[in-house]
Image: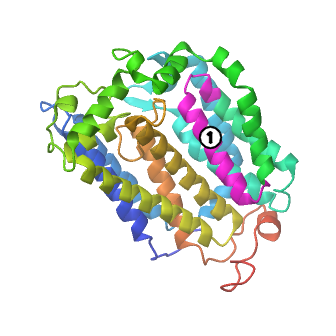
Amino acid sequence: MFLRVTRIDWATVISTIALVAFGVLMLSTTADPDTRGLENQAVQKAVLGALGLAVAVAMAQVDYRGLHGLAAPVYLLGVVALVLVLLVGDFDLGARRWFEVGPIVVQPSEFMKLAAIVAFAKFLSDRSDSTRSIRTVMVSLGVMLIPASLIFLQPDLGTALIFGAIWMAMVFVAGARWWHLMTPIIIALAAFPFAWFLAQDYMRQRFVTFLDPSSDPLGAGYNVLQARISIGSGGWFGHGLGQGSQSQLEFLRVRDTDFIFAMLGEQLGLAGTFGLLAFFTLLIVQALVIGLRARDPFGRLLAIGIAAMLFTQSFVNIGMNVGLMPVTGITLPLVSLGKNSLLVTLLSVGILLSIHSHRGAAPFRQQSMHVVRGSLPAAGPRGGPGR
């Protein structure tokens, strides 16, 4: 399982470092100047980012196909954690989303995203001959709906919707028919009136203010309006680090998590936001390329699932900063403050590096030999059936 691998995808590593650096830079402008060492949020992110990236690079040495045998137990463990957080999790800001054990805060929904990607990849790669059947698609939909429903009950609609985007991307790449993908969309649209009735009041209010933020400028629409002002006032090159009335005078709330993109736009201007978008584009494109070059269905689906997760999260977060998406509380991967999100994203990067490094490796052998003999094609010569 452990191999000496020197092939590192440096484009993925560099883009990851750059995005974490953007986050550290922004957090350094909002951190309490009286805090020192690890009490400082920017220092915490820098240290955790460096350690996480080191782990990600080390993961390139480990054959990712070992995750195949861990998919089911990790998925079940994640579901159990989601149930427990609903029952005994800490209640804060109107939701139960995490456990607090002393200074450590664990948010199971973040780790469940990666666990679900691994589970979907195993399920679909094991059934590569039947992914065009409606039965396989519907069963995989059920595998997705279990964690998504539990997360919706926290309530956390934004994260629940990310599961849907991940599922659609992976099922599409696995070979599902297009009308199989349209079926759950049609069902979701038909169920919208019921979902509206069951939704929390704040969810309905966020949707209404998305359509017209000025309808509640001091309430639900406040953050959206302040984010627009922040980005607009930044101009081409921004006010400079640590400058700008919206972020520095705290008119822009939750500026270190949900609206860190708006703060970046105010301080670094359009030039800074374009730079951030360039590194996100590089990271997501590299994830897609790694998936397309993978030598087995399991690796291909893992990479596509991670690419879908990164794209959806960044699109939704940036979209709500510029007023194109409702406010859902989704953080910006690698950039926003949030230890759980940062750790999960860096683990995902580690899996991408492993897929890249092992794309020409021999078939992985484990107790479940049908993985090699059945659902996974043998690694063949370039251009052959194993490509």
Colouring scheme applied when the structure was drawn = rainbow
20 or 317, nearer to the observer: 317
Measuring from the top left, give residue 340's x and y in whole percent: 44, 39
Q: Residue at x 59, y 65 (%)?
A: 291
Q: Would residue 87 be visible to someone looking at this image? A: yes
Identify the residue shown where x is 31% and y is 38%: 262
Please tell me in which quadrant of the rendered image residue 153 appears.
top right
User: Residue 281 at x, y = what percent?
Assistant: 43, 58
In the image, residue 66 lies at what x, y percent?
Answer: 64, 60
Specify the quadrant that holds the C terminus: bottom right
Q: Main secondary structure of the magenta part?
A: helix
Identified at 87% across, 46% down, the residue is 135
Identified by mark 1, the residue type is Phe
Q: Is residue 237 left or right of residue 326?
A: left
Between 364 and 273, the residue placed more toward the observer is 273
Task: Relative to 199, say whether 157 is above or below.
Answer: below
Residue underneath mark 1: 163
Q: Which residues are magenta?
A: 150-177
The residue under the point 72% across, 84% down is 384
Residue 203 in the image: state x and y as whole percent.
53, 20
Q: Is residue 127 above or below residue 295?
A: above
Describe residue 136's horizontal placement relative to residue 264 as left or right. right
Residue 166 on the magenta span: yes
Please rate how many residues cluster around mark 1, counting C-alpha atoms within 10 Å: few if below 14, some from 14 to 19, many from 20: many
Identify the element where label 1 is drawn: helix
